[in-house]
Structures are given as C-alpha cells and as structure tokens.
Amino acid sequence: MSSTRSQAVTRAFGEENRARLLRRFFGNREEVAPAEAWRDIYRLLLWIDRTTGLAHCYESDKCQPGRPWYARSLAFHGWVAHQLGTTPSGLADHVDWLFRQASEDLAIATARSRHSALVQAQRQPYEGQHFPEPGEDPELVEIILELLGDWFAEQPPAEAMQALTARIQAHVTKENKRKNLVGEGFEDTLAALLHRSRGIRDAYEIRTRPWLHGLPGFHPAPPGQKPRQVDLALIHRSTRQRVLMTAKWSVRSDREEQFVTDFRDYARYEALGQDFDYVLITNEFDAARLAAACDARRENAYLFTDVVHVNPQGPSVAYGKTGRRAAAKMADRINDGRLMSLETWLVKLTPA
C-alpha cells in the first residue's frame, strides 16, 4: 500500500475520525437508557458476514452452511433483526454504521489524494507517456470483462473501469481494517455510552485506553519493561475506587491467557494495597468461553469482578434448547447473574 493510501486509511479508521463519527451517531442524545445501550452497540459495530449473508456472531469458517454455527447464526440473525425493528433481509442497513461511515470517508479521501495538486505535479513530467493511473488494475479489468462482458451493451469506457477497480480495491482494503475498528471501536462505543449515563459520568472519571501508571494508585513499569495500557477505566470521584475494564468483542484462547497475565501485572503495579475491580465486557458467543471467563479464578477469588455481555439473550437464542453441556453451563451463569447483561452492569454502576 502506498504511503498516501496508508495515510488515508489511518485517517478514516483512526481514533479522531471514530470520535467524530460517534458524535454524529449519538447527535443530541445526552442520555442513553441502559436498556437501549446494547442496541446502539449492535447498530454501530455488528456486521454481516458476506460469506453467509448473516449477522456475524462466530468465526466465519464455522458458520458456513451445513455446519452447526450456521443454524445458530440463522437464529441470532432473525432475533437481532426483530430486536432492531427490521426484517432479516433488511438487517444489513441497520447495523455496521461505524464501519460503513468510515469506509465512505476512506473512499472520499482516496479519490481526493489521487487527484490532488501534488499528485498532478508529480505526474506532470511524464505527461503523454501513458503511465498507469493510480488504481489501474488491468488484470482485474480483464476478469470483470471476461465474466460480465456478454451482458454489456457496449464496452465500458476506461474511466468507468478504473473507477470500478478503485472501488473494489477500497472494499478489500477496508475489510482488512475491520479488525482494528471493531477492537478500538468497541472501547470507544462503550466510553460514549458511559459518558451518556448521567449517574455514571457524574460519579466516575471515564478514561479510554489510559496508561496503567497514569491511573491513581499504580506504579510505573520498571525500566526496560513496556508500559501497560488498559482498555477502559473508571475512577470513582469520591471513593477513588478503580474499575479496570478489558473490552473484547470476542474471546479467543490466547486472550484467555492474556486476561490472567494482565491482572497479574495490574496487581504487581498496584501501589496502595487496595482492591480494584477487574471487569470483562464482551460480545463472545461461544458458550464454553463465556462460562470459562465467569469461572476463571486467581488464588481464592474470581479473576473478573464482573463478566458483562452486550446482551446474553443473543448467545442464548443462538444455542436454543440444545442439550450441550457448555450451553447449559452458560445458561446457569446467566441465571445466577455471574454473566450479566450490559444493561444490568450499567444499572449496577449508577449510584442510587
């Protein structure tokens, strides 16, 4: 990827533009009811898996038709469409807002960069020598014409094919950026929701991706060791109680190990000899992983003070009435409150 293209991608999907887009999404809404928070998260971040046409809730390769997660994806897709007030066929227009808006910004920035005065000045010495234009891809054009040429009334002009190949290239590039956008975008969205809960914003300082040593009561990392960063943190304004949050859209096996490592570092650098809350917020759908997070322990206590799911009804609907042991265990954790909804957690945080 060219440096110009890379800069355009960084701007479109970066922190500053995400903040701008979130402000646009929430508009004048200074308050978001806890019961509605999960819907905003799904409208902003949930996406459609293009290989199945369904809302993404698990690894794509395991959700293909004929595999167990395809049936679960169908169940979740129908449920979430109903919850968001649309139809299964119309769900795509009601989710993935943050990514779609960032992608539009990327397309605009890319088009501007390719036709900027600087680019024209750089190409001017070679005018008339038929140098390739930015975005030209003869091989891709050949594939398109080979597959669709028989349906064209006439050969598309070169400018139209160049615009088409540029759009395709932008689509491929932006899909590769989804992972980063969902990761930090989830943190940003949670922070935006916390700021839009009057009781929480009045009671707590809300910090997004702070350095651990910048939080009250934590030592800096020793020389030569990488400073630790926290996804989100809440500092109670009066008691100074600290809530350290790890926000992960999904939970993989390597992340399960990282949770323990992170907590050990947080505990090692704690300087006041006081407890702090350690909270997991996730949209994971795998029942075994969710149950494992709920049951994870460090010494004689739970690893996580709270395990929070965007909406536990989602994975419950996906599994249905299956007799799988993991699904039953997840249901037990939901029923006993160990796996709580985002709504419940927000209410818990809000002072009486």
Image (cartoon, helix red, strand yellow):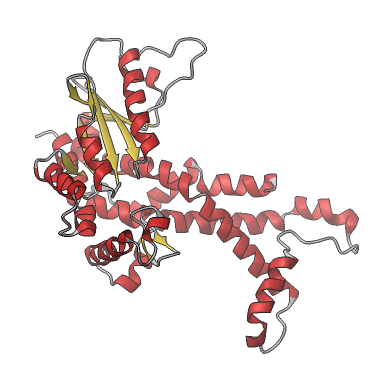
The answer to whether residue 312 shows anywhere in this view is yes
The answer to whether residue 236 shows anywhere in this view is no
| 41 relative position to 324: left or right | right
| 281 relative position to 147: left or right | left
| 186 relative position to 198: left or right | right
Residue placed most toward the observer, 215 or 76:
76
Q: Which residue is drawn at 34% across and 73% down?
A: 89
Q: Which residue is drawn at 37% across and 35% down?
A: 255
Q: Residue at x 34, y 41 (%)?
A: 251
On-image quarter of the C terminus: top left
- Measuring from the top left, give residue 77's x and y in whole percent: 29, 64
Instruction: Work out which residue is located at the far bottom of the displayed protein and give it.
Output: 153
**Residue 122 drawn above or below residue 147:** above
**Residue 185 drawn above or below residue 274:** below
Quadrant in the picture for residue 339: top left
- Measuring from the top left, give residue 225's x and y in whole percent: 49, 15
Residue placed most toward the observer, 249 or 30:
249
- Measuring from the top left, give residue 197's x and y in whole percent: 22, 41
Q: Residue at x 62, y 45 (%)?
A: 7
- Measuring from the top left, give residue 54's x and y in whole percent: 36, 65
Quadrant in the picture for residue 198: top left
Q: How many labels does the image show?
A: 0
Residue placed most toward the observer, 236 or 294:
294
